[in-house]
Image: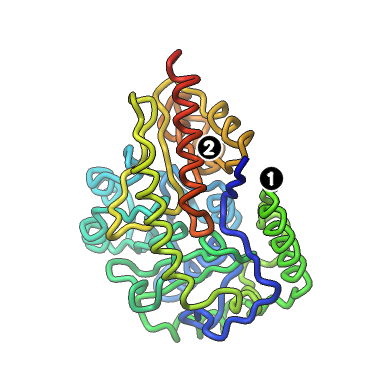
Amino acid sequence: MIVVPGNAVYNKFWPSSKKAIRSPHKRWFSYGRHAFVSYFKYLEHQFQKINTVWVPDYICHEVVNSFNAYNYEVKYYPLNDELEPDLNTIASITKEAVPHDVFLLCHFYGKIVKNLKEISSLLTSKQIHLIEDCVHLPFANLEISRPAHSAARMFSFRKIYPVPYGSFLVTKDEQKKFTNFLSQHIEAHVDHQTARVIRWMAREYLKSLALRFKIPVKRKYTNLSLDPLQPFNFAHPLVERMIDQNDWHVCFSQRRENYVLYQQYFKPQTDWIKPFEFDIQNDCPYQFPLTLASGMERKHFVSYFLKHGVAAQFGLALHKNVLDRLPKDHHYNRHVTLPVHQGISEKEVMYVCDLLKQYEETFISNY
């Protein structure tokens, strides 16, 4: 049996990158939600108190919990089958929103929202701050990643690269203004918990050894073991040296190649499953997302792949307020994902595709 982990595994004995990727303001936040709240505070300092934060209903519950903890009113907007907001939805929001509300736009699974320019135009006309959540997109470099149609973009390294934590905002206005605000108005300090980072490195190194011997390892959620920080702390500089400037080139190319391999080796015989479509020239797949047909049980699908050593996953862990009102057969509840990251090879992609074919032959004939 081949073992295919859900994310790239850190396998260096010690971080020694001499060409580390540098964040624009030279400091990383511990997590993306910390960066968001910090930027909200910055906007309030520049303009006025934020009345409402508009978020997609398909978003991780931890982000919503963080906003609620800082007394921001959260309102949800729906997404279509491609996990993008319709322009009609945006137009409706502009009628209800007030100036200096915040609109969070997410590029889910590395698929860049098609109508970004139009959405930006509608929101800007009503003085609504557009922030892009690029949590599923690899950070390339400052030139490529600087926002052109929004106030800021948030990237999360820990979702893409094998690091315990680390995210930052790239702001449209002068970086020094945001940095100075953080240092003067928010109790932000560098996280010196080096021991925690070293323990994480040791676990990852042992995990990489286990994978060589085809021993399945369960992924431990880093936010449970490495998030004892106050919301405005910055990640330790040690983490910054775990990633080399060349890593993003490898990440972009390998993820795109693996997606193409999935498309090449697996072609469903019926419409029991629908892969997400990526523009491989512009998008960069975070995972290989699939939508199961109406009436199918995704728990059975995920369990089958886990049993065979492949780290299949459900979609995002949504907030209870969203889950309670969703129909049981809603397409959010039928999302599953398979690994596509830079740490897997063509042989491993072929193995996953063979499992997809076996699953189709074994179970779908009775569907």
Q: CA distance from mark 2 to mark 1?
A: 34 Å
| Residue picked out by circle 1 | 216
Of 96 and 19, nearer the camera is 19
Dot 2 falls on a residue whose secondary structure is: helix
In the image: residue 155, left or right of residue 117: right
Residue drawn at x 53%, y 50% as measured from the top left: 64
- Residue 304 placement (x, y as % from top left): 58, 30
Residue at the (28%, 71%) spot, across then down: 148
Left or right: residue 144 compared with residue 27: left
- Give the residue furthest to the top: 366
Could you say which is closer to the camera, residue 6 or residue 63? 6
Name the spot of residue 156 as percent of width and height, x first. Answer: 51, 64
Does residue 103 show up? no
Q: Position of residue 216 (x, y in %)?
A: 69, 45
Q: How crowded is the residue under tag 1: few (<14 C-alpha within 10 Å), some, or many (20+)? A: many
Q: Name the N-terminal-most of marks 2 and 1.
A: 1
**Front-lying residue, 349 or 83:** 349
Residue 121 or 228: which is nearer the viewer? 228
Residue that numbered label 2 is attached to: 321
Quarter of the image that includes the N terminus: top right
| Residue 89 found in image quarter | top left
Mark 2 in CB contact with mark 1 (< 8 angstroms): no
Against 62, residue 325 (above or below) is: above
Mark 2, residues whose alpha carbon is within 10 Å: few (<14), some, or many (≥20)?
A: few
Q: Give the residue type that dot 1 points to.
A: Pro
Regarding residue 197, the answer to whether it shows in the image is yes
Mark whose residue sits in front, 2 or 1: 1
Tell me if 196 is positioned left or right of 357 in this view: right
Q: How is the image coloured?
A: rainbow
